[in-house]
Image: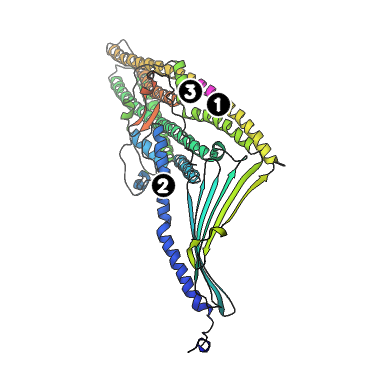
Amino acid sequence: MPPSSRPVPPPARAGSIARPVLRAAALGAALCVAGACYTPSEQLRNADKAAYEILLKRRAELGESGEFTIEPPADSLRQRMLAGETPGALGLVQTLAVAAENSRDFQRRKEDLYLAALDLTLERFAFQSQRNGQLDALVNGTGAEATDAAVGAGAGLRRLLGSGALWIGDIGLSLARSLSSRDSFGLQTDLGLSVTQPLLRGFGRRIVMEPLTQAERDVVYQARSFERFRRTFAVDVTSRYLRILQQELQLRNEEENVANLETVRARNEALSQAGRLSEVQVAQAQQDELRSRIRVIDQQQRLQLALDNFKLFLGLPIQSTIALNTAEVDALDSGGGLEVDEQRAVSFALEQRLDYLTALDAVADAERKIPIAANRLMAAVDLNSSIRASSDPRKPLEFDKDLLKWDIGLDIDLPIDFIAQRNAYRETLITLERAKRAEIELADSIRVALRDELRQARTQLETLRIQENAVELAERRIESTQLNQQAGRAETRDYLEAQEALRQARNALITARIDYHLARLNLWRDMELLRVDESGVKPDETLLAPAAPTDDGADDSQPIPTPVEPQR
């Protein structure tokens, strides 16, 4: 049949051509998602992996190697107690763990540290090769007839360099067909590359990488802040724990005193009935016994209130019953003096205190931002260039060099009415002066605190020694009074006064031991000697050892890590 006599096919309907085109686009999108994208749970694991890797390294630089996670424990003590479990006597180490897992402030501090690391991952990503891809499908027409159909795919790559240059490359494929003329599909390839290089404003590694530099330093600051808080928090928990043990031991002392007075009262009553003792001495013993019983009742009430407040602090059910290990007081070191003088303590603290190191670095940050703010007052002069090539619609891999499109130009933004930039520059100068004043103030406050804590520790040690002697003296007084009473050379009042002196001396000794230990904890904390690990709270005394001299005299201090300049 001649071509002129062939039947003309009917125009393509929109539905008949749209469905296969859209199906092809949907299939391509599904393949792309399956091959290059992640589910929300996978993205969460990737974020945790990147953030925890950063935190592991930064915390190791501070001498901390314990596990770090922001996820709550699967079976906390609170949950187990609500389920009916009754824990045994809580030791100090277990109490520290319970306080950390239930403290809202502790959890917030951990999240702040994690978020700082997460922000750093984004700033690092800004200097990595960033990829993108897209798929699209289109059918258009008039009325019930489809006139054109197209399917497109594209991929791009961008990279920011340390000089401020921004490179953007892209490749695109397009498959198009005119349905009205019944042409076959044509495949075309497009290639493009553009480069923008700042020449004045925004030029240079120091300017371009400032967000990354600050993000790196912010992670260090948050790590320091968290470790400083963790050590301070441990001292707070220890103080609360020991103060409750102090009340428990003093309650035992009061109960023992009641038992002794009961014996005295019963003995006096028996002697009175035998006519060997006056009623006055019987009444004296009875009155002291009653006063002692009242003290026991008051001490019991104060102890129960302290335990309830401690359970509230630990995040444990208030209605539950907990017990603390009183043997922790016996384990306290009550010997030895403080083998560090004031000058050494202050100089060591100014070298080691995490918050003071951050104050020093804040001055450096403020100084670094001044030339950056000054750079923003300059004119923006950007050199722009681009090149683009398109293939023949029927030959997607063939490009005609004579049809290449390119351009090169210069964009200039004059610094006119830069009020915001001017004010920002002035603010950076003020911020620097404030940072310097804050650093000086913190250094002075550290000196004042350490001087006071050294005096407190020495005073508490002397008080402890006096109270130990006072207990020995009171015990000898009891023995002497008993012997004199048996020989008829002492009355009941003499023994009661000796018993009261012993009760007070024992209570004071318990207080002195705990006061001395807490005074040393505060000193270690503010000298940044304190360490918190699985074994509890203790000082790292090796840090006080003088460093071995180096032959070259080089500074062995570890500076804050700065980002590596991206490859140009």
Q: Earlier in the sequence, mark 3 or mark 1?
A: 3
Kindly indicate the quadrant of the structure image that contains residue 201.
top right
Where disc 3 sits, the SS reads helix
Specify the label residue 350 is tagged with: 3
Where disc 2 sits, the SS reads helix
Q: Earlier in the sequence, mark 3 or mark 2?
A: 2
Q: Are marks 2 and 1 in contact (CB under 8 Å)?
A: no
Specify the label residue 439 is tagged with: 1
Mark 3 or 2: the one toward you: 2
Specify the label residue 48 is tagged with: 2
Position of residue 553 in the picture relative to residue 420 (left or right): left
Q: Is residue 300 above or below residue 148?
A: above
Percent x, y of residue 475:
31, 16
Q: Are marks 3 and 2 in contact (CB under 8 Å)?
A: no
Q: Magenta residues, as a range?
A: 442-449
Relative depth, front residue between 377 and 106: 377
The reply to whether residue 471 is visible in this rendering is yes
Relative depth, front residue between 311 and 272: 311
Q: Amino acid at mark 3?
A: Leu
Q: Is residue 34 above or below residue 24?
A: above
Tell me which residue sits at (63%, 49%) in the image: 409
Percent x, y of residue 325:
32, 33
Tell me which residue sits at (36%, 35%) in the image: 65
